[in-house]
Every structure is written in structure tokens, then in C-alpha cells.
Image (tube, rainbow, N blue to C red):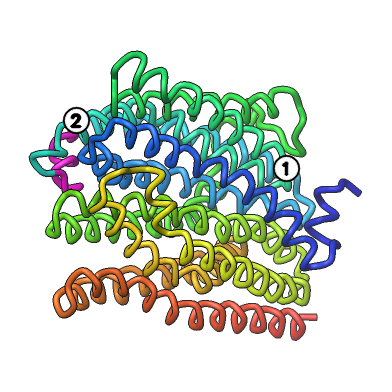
Amino acid sequence: MDKRIFILSEEKPAKAVVRMGVPLIAGMFIMVLYNLVDTYFIGLLNNDYQLASVNLAYPVMMISMSLSNMVGAGASSLIARSLGANDKDKAERTLTTGFLLTVINSLIVTAAGLLLIEPIVRGLGAKENTFGYTKDYVFVILLGSLFTMGSYTFGQLLRSEGSVKQSIAGMAAGTVTNIILDPVFIFLLGMEIRGAAIATVLGNLVSMLVSLLFYARGKTLLLPHFKFIKPTRDIIGEIFWVGVPAMLETLLTSAAFIVNNNLAVSYGELTVAATGVAQKILSLGNYIYQGFAAGTQPIMGYNYGAKNYKRMLSVLKAGVLTVSLTELCVMAVYGIFAPLLIGIFTQTPEVIETGSRVLRTIMFILPFVGAISMSRMSFQAMGKPQYAFVITLVRQLILYVPLLLLLNHIFGFNGMLLAQPVTELIMMTASVFLLYRVIKSEESANTKRL
């Protein structure tokens, strides 16, 4: 039996979660460096408006990633379930379709984004001091949409078959490229924030090419084929069935991020810089739970395809316990060292003070949000995206945004910061309970059929 299949099907649940999740966490830490490196080098310019602009521009990256997530989540779910059902032909058809959709979507994003760039930048919350910087950054990111989306989607497709190390290699290569090129473009060539964007795009290009190289050299379990280049209606339908809700989840998160930024701007543009730095540092903790959730997704999808519901419940329990305990340790580090961490990226006392305050408040999401992410990705893996979408819809639109506006109105900046921890605490309980009940229902229905 192939080692990758053994981990998905027979490895002890806790060990499988760790073996699939930890390498992804390492790879995602590498991805965090994309944002942190840009933030660090831009911070060395001693221009906090440029620092704020990177944060304002981030939703554009999130929108590109939402389309990548549509293809990646939809195709990955179908690939894992097809492998669990021993249908390799369908898995490779799905892989090929995923490649094609990535190229098409990236061309649409680039064309539409460049056409509407000025209203987009205004909508992001950029004001007089940040508009030009934000526009420069967004312009370059839009030009490189194919590389950003290709890097993200192809990594997901590799993970769907258990090829975790290969996906990490692409991330690592892209990040090293970005680290090397950032000081060259920002300082040596004097391009400042535009240079940071160029370095990011070129890093994504390298990451995408490395992932493609594994396929080209036949080092993967599955391979794309030109004979499958014409997508079938059923595969397109299944990719979109899981992928569109996944895309909408990312878009809703991006919309909530924009609302948050626009509220933060009302407290001053330097507050946006402080909030952005705190969010970037928090992303180290975010990628831990995302790594465990992404690592768990193919395990859940494979075993759902194999109708092994008992193993699914064991994996869920092991995953939630592992991610929650890990995030509690991360939260303690943030609480103790917040000013030191913020001070790495800026020397402005106001930004350090506000950023520390932000980090010490929003860090309370970490023990809760991992279970939410694991539940969402499990539903996607099972081909039940409607549940994943409901979790996100309730989380972002029904709870978070109204709480954000209400608490900001009543308690000001402190209220704005507390909205997210309160939301995540409620959603953790609801999402895990929902997933448990759905798995038990599927198990009961399957038992009756037998």
C-alpha cells in the first residue's frame, strides 16, 4: 500500500492528524513570511502610511485566494473522495479540470481588477495619505494573479492526494525567493511598496513552477492529462458544488476584513497600521489551526468516500484536541511578548502601543477558531459544502459584522476588538456539534442500508 494512502486510511487518528498537519503548519509558517517579510522591510522605510497600505490591500489577495479556494477546495474534495472510492480515473480528470479553471479565473481577475482599480482602492478604505501606496501595491498584485492563484491552488491539489511534502516545497521555494528579492526591489532599486509587491508576485511564480515540476516529473500519485482537458459536466458541477461555497466563505471573510479596516480608519490611519501588524503576527497562530484543518481534510474526505464513519469521528476528536492545546500555548506567547513582537516591524510608539493592545485582545480567538476551521473543511471534504457555508454565513454576517458595528458603537475601539473573540467562542460550540451530528446521521443511514 502506498504510504500516502496508509496515512489517510489506517494510521492512528492522532498520529495521522499530526503527520498530515505538522508539515503543512511548517509550510504555512513559510507562507506567513510572505506577509511578515513585506511588512518588516516596508517598516524599515519608517513610513507608517506604506505599512498601513499593505494591510488595506490585503483583501485583494483574499479575493484572488477565494477563487483559488473555489477550485482548490472543490477539486481537492472530489479527488480525495474519488481515491477513497478507488476511482483514480475520476481523480485525474478532476485534477486536470482544476488546472484549467485556475488559468481561466486568473485572467478574469486580472482584467476586471485593472479596469476597476481606482474604485477598488477607495472601497478598501484608502484615504489621502494611503491611496497612492495602496494603488501601487494592488496594481502589481493584480498583474500577478495567475502566479498567486496557481501557487495556492496547485498546493491544495497536491495535498488532496497526500503529497504534503511536495506542496511544502513549493511554498518554501516561493518564500525564499520573496525574502531575497524584497530588499533588492524595495531598497536597492528604490521601488518601496511597489517593489514589495513585485517580490511577492515573483515568489508566487517560483512556488507555482515548483509545484508544476513535481507533476511534470511524475513524482505525484495523480497526473494531469491532455486527454482530460475538456471538462465533463459532472466534474465541473461537483467542483462548483463544493467550491462556490468555499469561495463565498473567503469573500465573506474579506468583506468583514474591509468593514473592520474602515472602522479602524476612523481612529486614524496609524491605527490601521497597528491593526495590520497585529493581524500579521496573529497569522502565525492562524496558520497553525489552518494547517491542522487542511491536513485533516483529505483524511476526512478519503474515509467518507470509504464510508469509514468511525474513523472520521476519531480523527475529529483528535484534531480538535490537538489544535486547541497548541493554540493555547501560542496565545500565551502573544500575551507575554506582544510589545516586543510589534516592535520588530515599527519604531513608532503609538503603533507599538496600539498594536500590542490589538494583539492581546484578538489572540483570544485562537483556542476556538481551530475547531471551526476543522469543521468547515471536514464538511467540504465530505462534499457537503452547504453546512460549511452556513457556518461561515452565521459567523461573518449574522454574528461578527453586527457585533463589530454594535460593540464599536457602544464601547469604541475596545468593542471593535472584542467582536471577533465573542463570535468565535459561540461558533466553536455550534460548528463541532453540527459536524458530529451529521457524521452520526450518515453512519446511521449507512447502517440501515446494509
For the point 19% across and 30% down, the residue is: 115
For the point 77% across and 39% down, the residue is: 221
Query: Residue placed farthest to the left in the image?
Result: 128
- How far from the left and from the top, in percent, is residue 61? 36, 41
As drawn, 418 above or below 357: below
Quadrant of the drawing holding the C terminus: bottom right
Label annotation for residue 163: 1
For the point 46% across and 49% down, the residue is: 70
The residue indicated by pointer 2 is 115
As drawn, 171 above or below 350: above
- How far from the left and from the top, in percent, is residue 426? 43, 82
Mark 2 neighbour class, 10 Å CA radius: few under 14, some 14 to 19, many 20 or more: few
Q: Which span is picked out in magenta?
A: 115-126
Residue 284 in magenta?
no
- How far from the left and from the top, in percent, is residue 189? 33, 13
Residue 122 in magenta?
yes
Mark 1 neighbour class, 10 Å CA radius: few under 14, some 14 to 19, many 20 or more: many
Q: Is residue 92 left or right of residue 118?
A: right
Tell me how far mark 1 sits from mark 2, CA to CA.
38 Å
For the point 68% across and 45% down, the residue is: 91
